[in-house]
């Protein structure tokens, strides 16, 4: 069906495209991710079609790569993209792509665009071949004469005129024997006519290469070879012959050209007709008869306008003939009529055959029936505007019509609302029940929405399981809030497909003009943000766009982008907060805390970027950097003689869930030369308890390495005493909220005392964090807690400053030594 190269920077998506194409019967020659690889495969394997992602690995994108391929190999390109902005479209159009596939897409959409593009490429090649064949008839280098059954000349080229020293006017219609005077083995007379009749009799080509001499009007005589081939009008009857003469005194290759002439008249799939200048049809091939529906005797001698459909006006034909007279050729699309009355489109190429004096002697027309191609083009045009599954407007048409609606609202001072509806958990349905089942649900889902809004809204399948609709302010329509809730209610009624009942819910985002934006792109950004918040709110709900939420999302997005290169740009720093023994004032240990100082902007606080890093997964790389940096800093303290007993590092939930976490810790310890018992890892109570047995096993492995373990933020989760006993922790960090509550009432003090006594009972050393004044410190000492950290002693400080504190220590409380 076609050989296809897939160029996609996303490996999984590239493999998915390849699998879909192979399932559809196509051959995938390769799946590559870079421009360089694409250029190499295109050159070496010459695929029929290339699916090109716009975004590629490396400096050269898909559009530039496509331009290079079109210049060097002229291979058709289809773009794969999730982008639809005008700049991408403008750049892409320069490369003359055959189509676009917008992500996400279905196998049906992919198949439609690929099959149509392959058919279009094949049609263009057919037209190109037709033009070449037409020109060949007029420009063959060897003398060619065609004769009818009686031996009279029907057509000759300029080489024949030059060889026989006669003009085409002198030859056409004359017996070839009187024009081409040959002697064969010393015999003269009707040599050619006898040979032609022999060819008709034996029904095989005849080749004479020896003892054949041509006598011309002016000397000298020249030795020639003669090849005679029959031309069949029908399989049963001989219609004429082709004579190919060759001056073998300066012999040139003629076999290929003779075969080409025979193929033009005998086996071409394009319709071919030859006319005189009047024009009257002199010859047609079998393909002409098959396409037009006429018999040969019904068209010979007739004007080519016998096929005229009446579709084109007189001006069209005047322009055609004027170009043909001036340039000698015309190419284009024309609508003709078959004998049965059916009008059909064809690609037609007409070439004027002129003699040495520039006089037109014949016209050769070659045409291809493009009815099927036209139908495919109509399908392609449909698919560019409508969704093939539901028949609704697609993203392109929706955006175009929404822009028009906005302009209409601007002119009238009106408003409109844009709603985006997303089926909750639809991917799970596809995975469990299959895409065919999912497609049935999508069709029924779209029908319910269409039945509800009827003609009051522009409805679109925006892509995948997302639908969009625009409600213009008509003054008597359904209020937006009521419509949104009605949609949720209607869509929550069970769906039935393949004998199954499925309960669906949906999330809806809403934006409005003019409040949220004044063009379709701004409204789409806003509605997408609103939809995101609707899904985060628990789904099966609707949310209006909120500017503050949008601004927060933008800030979070910038933070996420900045974090990706924060390590490479050396923007992260570690500060250390000491943990103090109340009785002695000595620094027992410290906790490593990360700070971010982006270049060119103010410091971003941990409370802002840590949750985003955790949500996006970047915390794994950042946590690994923190652990390595803390271990290297501890080695510097050791070498300077100012090291505390340990350094504590926080472990995020994402880090702890990583199957390779223990090996990562082991590797960093070995690489930095860190003694395991000088490293403490802090794991929050919620992380430890949520992972249950898995957490116990992983903590046990860390404990075997010799690392200290601390249970962080104790009291904020749901730990039971019985479960705590099973975890191999060394210390327990009391959350700062209990320190604050202990001074606000008896209940808080009781809770704090219970935690400290419990830690003693479990043989865990308690560390109180968030200690900010002396009264808190005295209260903790009274309860038996001896290890604290907080602003009362020190804020988190750089590593070199902590070394000074370790050496100097702090003043013990009054009464302590």
Image: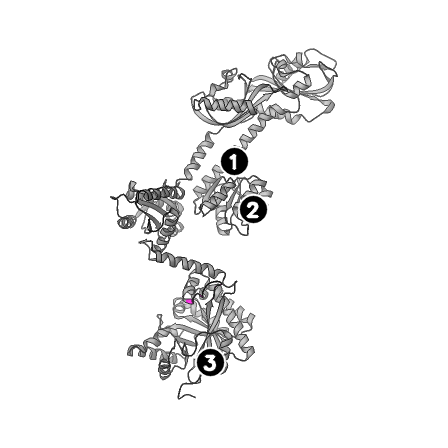
Is 513 magenta? The answer is no
Query: How far across and how far down the image is residue 698, in percent?
Result: 46, 69
Residue closer to the observer: 256 or 726:
256
Residue closer to the observer: 63 or 315:
315
Q: Is residue 149 above or below residue 123?
A: above
Query: Cβ–Cβ below 8 Å for labels 2 and 3?
Result: no
Q: Single out the mark in the foreground, 2 or 3.
A: 3
Query: How far across and how far down the image is residue 271, in percent?
Result: 52, 24
Q: Which circle marks residue 38 in the picture?
A: 2
Q: Earlier in the sequence, mark 1 or mark 3?
A: 1
Residue closer to the observer: 189 or 399:
399
What segment carries the magenta color? 597-606
In this orientation, does residue 520 appear? yes
User: What secondary structure is found at the residue carrying circle 3?
Assistant: strand
User: Most extreme residue toward the left, as rendered?
Assistant: 476
User: What secondary structure is found at the residue carrying circle 2?
Assistant: helix
Q: Is residue 460 left or right of residue 185?
A: left
Distance, label 2 to label 3, CA atoms, is 61 Å
The crowd level at tag 3 (other Cα within 10 Å; few <14, some 14-19, many 20+) is many
Q: Which residue is mark 1?
A: 121
In this orientation, does residue 29 appear? no
Q: Single out the mark in the foreground, 1 or 3.
A: 3
User: What secondary structure is found at the residue carrying circle 1?
Assistant: helix
Q: Which residue is mark 3?
A: 587
Query: How far across and how far down the image is residue 65, in percent?
Result: 55, 45
Query: How far across and how far down the image is residue 420, in percent?
Result: 35, 49
Q: Earlier in the sequence, mark 2 or mark 3?
A: 2
């Amino acid at each position: 069906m076609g050989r296809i190269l897939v160029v996609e920077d996303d490996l999984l998506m590239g493999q998915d495209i390849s699998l879909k194409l192979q399932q559809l019967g196509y051959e995938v020659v390769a799946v590559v991710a870079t421009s360089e690889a694409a250029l190499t495969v295109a050159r070496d394997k010459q695929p029929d079609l290339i699916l090109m992602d716009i975004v590629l690995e490396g400096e050269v994108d898909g559009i530039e790569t496509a331009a290079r391929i079109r210049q060097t190999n002229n291979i058709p390109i289809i773009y794969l993209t999730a982008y639809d902005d005008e700049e991408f479209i403008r750049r892409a159009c320069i490369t003359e792509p055959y189509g676009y596939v917008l992500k996400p897409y279905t196998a049906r959409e992919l198949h439609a665009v690929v099959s149509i593009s392959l058919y279009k490429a094949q049609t263009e090649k057919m037209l190109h071949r037709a033009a070449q064949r037409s020109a060949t008839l007029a420009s063959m280098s060897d003398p060619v004469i065609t004769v009818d059954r009686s031996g009279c000349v029907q057509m000759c080229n300029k080489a024949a005129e030059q060889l026989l020293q006669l003009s085409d006017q002198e030859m056409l219609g004359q017996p070839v024997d009187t024009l081409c005077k040959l002697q064969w083995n010393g015999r003269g007379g009707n040599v050619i006519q006898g040979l032609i009749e022999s060819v008709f009799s034996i029904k095989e080509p005849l080749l004479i290469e020896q003892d054949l001499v041509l006598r011309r009007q002016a000397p000298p005589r020249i030795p020639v070879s003669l090849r005679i081939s029959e031309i069949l009008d029908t399989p049963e009857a001989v219609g004429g012959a082709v004579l190919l003469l060759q001056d073998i005194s300066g012999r040139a290759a003629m076999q290929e050209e003779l075969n080409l002439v025979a193929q033009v008249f005998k086996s071409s799939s394009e319709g071919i007709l030859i006319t005189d200048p009047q024009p009257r049809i002199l010859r047609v091939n079998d393909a002409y008869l098959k396409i037009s529906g006429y018999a040969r005797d019904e068209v010979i001698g007739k004007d080519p306008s016998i096929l005229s459909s009446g579709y084109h006006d007189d001006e069209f034909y005047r322009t055609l003939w004027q170009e043909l007279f001036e340039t000698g050729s015309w190419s284009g699309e024309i609508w003709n009529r078959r004998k049965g009355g059916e009008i059909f489109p064809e690609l037609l190429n007409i070439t004027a055959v002129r003699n040495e004096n520039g006089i037109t002697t014949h016209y050769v027309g070659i045409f291809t029936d493009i009815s099927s191609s036209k139908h495919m083009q109509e399908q392609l045009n449909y698919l560019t505007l409508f969704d093939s599954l539901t028949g609704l407007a697609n993203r392109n048409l929706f955006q175009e019509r929404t822009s028009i609606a906005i302009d209409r609202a601007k002119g009238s001072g009106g408003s409109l609302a844009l709603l985006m509806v997303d089926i909750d958990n639809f991917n799970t349905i596809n995975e469990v029940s299959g895409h065919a089942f999912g497609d049935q649900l999508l069709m029924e889902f779209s029908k319910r929405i269409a039945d509800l809004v009827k003609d009051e809204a522009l409805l679109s399948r925006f892509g995948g399981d997302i639908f969009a609709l625009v409600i213009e302010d008509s003054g008597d329509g359904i209020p937006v809030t009521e419509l949104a809730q009605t949609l949720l209610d209607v869509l929550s009624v069970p769906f039935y497909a393949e004998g199954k009942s499925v309960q669906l819910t949906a999330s809806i985002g809403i934006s409005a003009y003019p409040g949220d934006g004044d063009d379709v792109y701004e409204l789409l950004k806003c509605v997408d943000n609103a939809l995101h918040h609707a899904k985060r709110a628990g789904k099966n709900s609707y949310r209006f766009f909120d500017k503050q939420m949008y601004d927060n999302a933008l800030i979070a997005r910038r933070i996420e982008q900045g974090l990706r290169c924060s390590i490479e740009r050396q923007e992260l720093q570690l500060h250390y907060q000491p943990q103090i023994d109340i009785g002695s004032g000595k620094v027992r240990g410290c906790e490593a805390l990360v700070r971010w100082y982006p270049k060119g902007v103010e410091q971003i606080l941990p409370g802002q970027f840590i949750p985003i890093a955790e949500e996006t997964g970047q915390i794994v790389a950042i946590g690994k950097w923190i652990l390595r940096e803390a271990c290297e800093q501890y080695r510097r303290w050791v070498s300077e003689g100012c090291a505390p007993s340990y350094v504590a590092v926080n472990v995020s939930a994402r880090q702890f869930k990583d199957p390779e976490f223990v090996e990562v810790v082991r590797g960093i310890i070995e690489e930095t030369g860190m003694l395991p018992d000088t490293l403490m890892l802090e794991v929050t109570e919620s992380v430890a308890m949520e992972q249950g047995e898995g957490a116990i096993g992983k903590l046990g492995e860390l404990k075997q390495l010799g690392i200290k373990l601390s249970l962080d933020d104790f009291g904020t989760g749901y730990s039971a005493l019985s479960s705590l006993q099973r975890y191999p922790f060394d210390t327990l960090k009391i959350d700062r909220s209990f320190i604050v509550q202990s001074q606000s009432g008896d209940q808080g003090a009781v809770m704090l005392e219970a935690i400290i006594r419990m830690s003693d009972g479990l043989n865990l050393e308690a560390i109180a964090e968030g200690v900010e004044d002396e009264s808190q410190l005295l209260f903790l000492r009274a309860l038996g807690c001896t290890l604290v950290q907080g602003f009362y002693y020190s804020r988190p400080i750089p590593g070199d400053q902590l070394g000074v504190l370790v050496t100097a220590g702090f003043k013990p409380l009054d009464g302590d030594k």
